[in-house]
Amino acid sequence: MKKAGIILFLVVFVLSALGFMEQPERKGLPKQQPLIVPKGWPKPLYDFSKNPLTAEGIELGRQLFYEQQLSRDGSISCGTCHQQFGAFNNYDHPLSHGLDNSLTTRNAPGLFNLAWQKSFMWDGGINHLDLQPLAPLTAHNEMGESIENIISKLKKSKTYPRLFKAAFGDPTINTQRLGKALSQFLLTMVSSNSKYDRVMQGADSFNLPEKLGYAIFKSKCSSCHTEPLFTDFSYRNTGMPLEPFLQDMGRMTITQDPADSLKFKVPSLRNVMVTFPYGHDGRFFSLSNVFEHYRNNMQVMGNTDALLKNKLPLSNYEIGQLKAFLQTLTDSVFLQNPRFAAPGTSPSATQPLDLHN
Amino acid sequence: MPAYKAIFLFGVLFAAMAVKAQHSIEFNPLYGTARWNPDSIYTNFAGENVQINKCLFYTSGWKAIINQQNKKGQTDTVILSNAHYLIDLSEPKSLKLPFTVPARATQLIFTLGVDSIKNTTGIQTGVLDPARGMFWTWRTGYIMARMQGTSPSANTAGKRFSYDVGGFESPYNAVRTITLHLPETTGSDNHAKNPLYIQTDLSKWFQGKHTISIAQTPNCHNAGKLAMQLADNYQQLFQLILY
């Protein structure tokens, strides 16, 4: 009996020791779920080693993205002004509505392919995706809440401590984790399933206008709206005169350099058909307005982009073909992916019919 | 144990004991030569009446230069702390630093501000948590130092003036290195355990390298030229004394 006892003890000892040895490095943390980089795309710029994606982290981020309690009066979530059917822009709004009937001063851009973006906002003032949400959360004309209150509301809630624990291994809730969780959700919003993408992979083909439009696009637009992300993320003055009420100087507000006056970030043209109105302050109602700006209405200034010193001559024919090509950049899989919809809902099967051609 | 080893060990022990004489260190908020009081009204160089309700700043990179030369004839630099501290002049607990300065030190060096790595790597925790309010959310960057108050000379709502100084990128980097010389009595036996005080004279915000009048510039809320001038001024806020 004594022998059996010793053997049993040894077996238990060895097994429990093995248990210690086989601990995974991320003890108690959820399984990582790396971002899939679309074929032919550059390496993402986001540092995933500091914030590895996990199903639990992404889900927490989604809950937070659609959480109205993050605003001061509980009326606005991130998703209020970033709507999936508009590729997460604010559909059909030149400027967005904030608390107490306030208006923002900039057009809410679509949100996708953020892992490849090195700075955020039309002026590039924010240098890290984790920090980006703090701007709309705290701006008095957006969600108007203090970070301190947001953290305290989340700590008091019944669900969030559990969700933070699932995502990060313990229930600590702080600003860093709030930002990381939102980033995890935002990083998964990859839009790479448009007709253009299928054509590039050889799985589909352009019709004639699309094909002609693509050739015109490559000769006249792609120096700034560079493939495959359809932006080079630079800041440029495209001859848009100063808006007298908003007085938005763009990039110059950040750098204080007069050479950056009225420069704004080149927006991606992916999903461009659903992200109207256009321009940093939503001044262009339709794509036709944008083309008209480039070929006629531009005000060429001292620091207007070298490529646009003579404006951008476009014939009616070229505009027609370009529009046909730009339609191929709409990613309907992305616009209706249930993983990006508000928790407990599914994306609307019927997209708004409004199109501002 | 060979004799030279024993001598070496003895030497190390002796050196360690000598280093043991340490000064605690603490900020002492002043306006001019008077102890700063948030209820008092002071006058700045321009004759403007000033009441200061708040002054906070980040410090980091605390180092001491040791008088004694090492074998190579160079003076030694001792790293006192790599942490960031948020000094809130209204918060007595934040004024006293959690480390000490070796008695043989001749210079004390620190950085006023938050280094660029912390400004470019997402959301930090602890005293660097943006929830502490010393952070610009609309354009990334820490507010390195803040001073707020009221003045009849401020042409603003509520006669308020407010200086939030930040910027971590060239040419508008508001981080400043402060080098303070320790008083000569430091380290002498009678003073070896006395606290060091960093006299922090808030009047220098208005008159340091530059003159800043509240009537002309009641607000600073972005990186840029004004922030750089205020930063040059707050570089001159400090002086060390030993009690």
Image: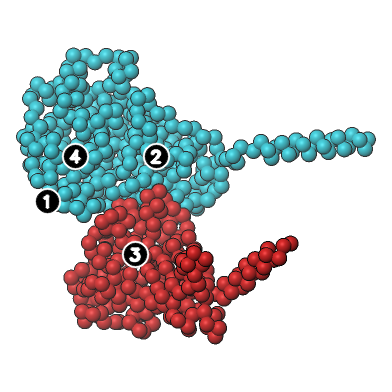
Q: Are marks 2 and 3 in contact (CB under 8 Å)?
A: no
Q: CA distance from mark 2 to mark 3?
A: 30 Å
Tell me, for residue A244, which label it has, or none. 1
Query: Disc 3 vs disc 4: which is toward the camera?
Result: 3
Q: CA distance from mark 2 to mark 1?
A: 36 Å
For label 4, the SS is loop
Q: Amino acid at mark 1?
A: Pro
Mark 4 — on which chain does it sit? A
**Image colour assigned to chain B:** red
Left or right? Give the position of B118 relative to A247: right
**Residue placed under numbered mark 2 in the picture:** A46
Vertical side of A132 occupied by A308: above or below? above
Can residue A293 be seen in this snapshot? no
**Residue placed under numbered mark 3 in the picture:** B176
Q: Residue at x 39, y 64 (%)?
A: B111
For label 1, the SS is loop
Query: Disc 1 vs disc 3: which is toward the camera?
Result: 3
Tell me, for residue A279, which label it has, or none. 4
Q: Are marks 2 and 1 in contact (CB under 8 Å)?
A: no
For label 3, the SS is strand
